[in-house]
Image (cartoon, rainbow, N blue to C red):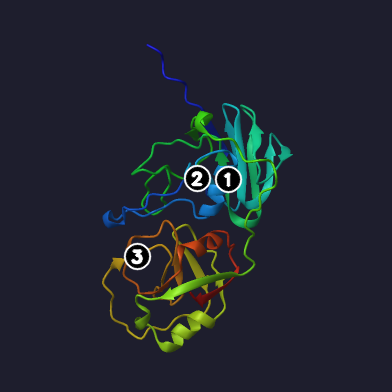
Amino acid sequence: MTPPPAVSRLYVVRAGALTTVQDAGRPGWAHLGVGRAGALDAPAARLANRLVGNPPDAAVLETTLTGCAVRPDRPVVAVVGGAGCRVTVDGRPVAWGAPVRVPSGAVLEAGPAVNGLRGYLAFAGGLAPEPVLGSRSADLLSGLGPPPLSEGDALPLGDPAGCGPPPPGDPVPWPGTPAELVLPVHPGPRHDWFTEAALRTLLTAAYRVSPHSNRIGLRTEGPALERSRTDELPSEGMVLGAVQVPPDGRPVVFLNDHPTTGGYPVVGVVPERALAAAAQAVPGTPLRFVRA
């Protein structure tokens, strides 16, 4: 009997502030209380995968602000994209946003972000931790999927044999980091729980991205929205991009790890296509809501 092939692994040398495994997420389970998860900057994750020849939904690493360092135990083609940063292999500078060859045992390091917030590391063959409900994504709220990375962790690498060829070596344009975050918003379903003045404030006031933002929600700093009703709202379903208003009156934009239900009124919903920019907005970034 032929023994199964040995599994190649990616070892974590430096985990960074928050590094997780993400793919396209696990949509379709909200009726069971399971959120979507998945890469916050989905276009960046898809582009990184394309550059190493992976399918768009292959699992990647998502870093937060401080990057990470990893060491494969086999040669691998990798791309570091998303937030701009210095990239090295065994201390030698290599290209950001383009395929690089990482020898077996060499350390690939994505340094701290110089613009943007979240970086994406894609590897030919993808990452292959055990999927949960059809996805390898980590969900910080529910705890589903692999936990955030720690030094010394080892992640299985997928087989690169089925990967397509990387695209030609011409430079690929990556989206820029927003100097100002402008989020279109559709009113409702609970905009009638707010005063007319509050609705004008939402669409005209200057906000900032709060440092308390995370994968669950983008929190804001700025004027509070006054409610016209003070009674309790029964818990109801929440969708990606929902703009929920907690008791302090500051809007919170729900991101991929958001809860599936909530009891605070939702004043509006930001379309999914606008959320990739929110994933790269650093704390303090000016923020405006505009009518979609």
For the point 52% across and 28% down, which residue is it? 161
Say whether disc 1 or disc 3 marks the residue closer to the N-terminus. Answer: 1
Secondary structure, mark 3, is: loop
Say whether disc 2 or disc 3 marks the residue closer to the N-terminus. Answer: 2
Say whether disc 1 or disc 2 marks the residue closer to the N-terminus. Answer: 1
Q: Do we see residue 36 in this rendering?
A: yes
Q: Do we see residue 63 in this rendering?
A: no
The N terminus, quarter of image: top left
**Alpha-carbon distance for marks 2 and 3?**
26 Å
Please tell me how crowded label 3 is: few (under 14), some (14-19), or many (20+) other residues with Cα within 10 Å: many
* Amino acid type of the residue that numbered disc 2 sits on in the rendered structure: Pro
| Discs 1/3, front | 1
> Picture coordinates of residue 164 (x, y %)?
55, 35
Please tell me how crowded label 2 is: few (under 14), some (14-19), or many (20+) other residues with Cα within 10 Å: some
- Residue in the foreground of this view, choosing between 235 and 166: 166
Q: Which residue is mark 1?
A: 48
- 167 above or below 283? above
For the point 47% across and 21% down, which residue is it? 6
* Amino acid type of the residue that numbered disc 3 sits on in the rendered structure: Met
Q: Which mark is residue 238?
A: 3
- 131 lies left or right of 157: left
Please tell me how crowded label 1 is: few (under 14), some (14-19), or many (20+) other residues with Cα within 10 Å: many
* Amino acid type of the residue that numbered disc 1 sits on in the rendered structure: Ala
- The number of numbered badges drawn on the structure is 3
Q: Which mark is residue 56?
A: 2
- 51 above or below 238? above
| Discs 2/3, front | 2
For the point 57% across and 26% down, which residue is it? 74
**Alpha-carbon distance for marks 1 and 2?**
9 Å
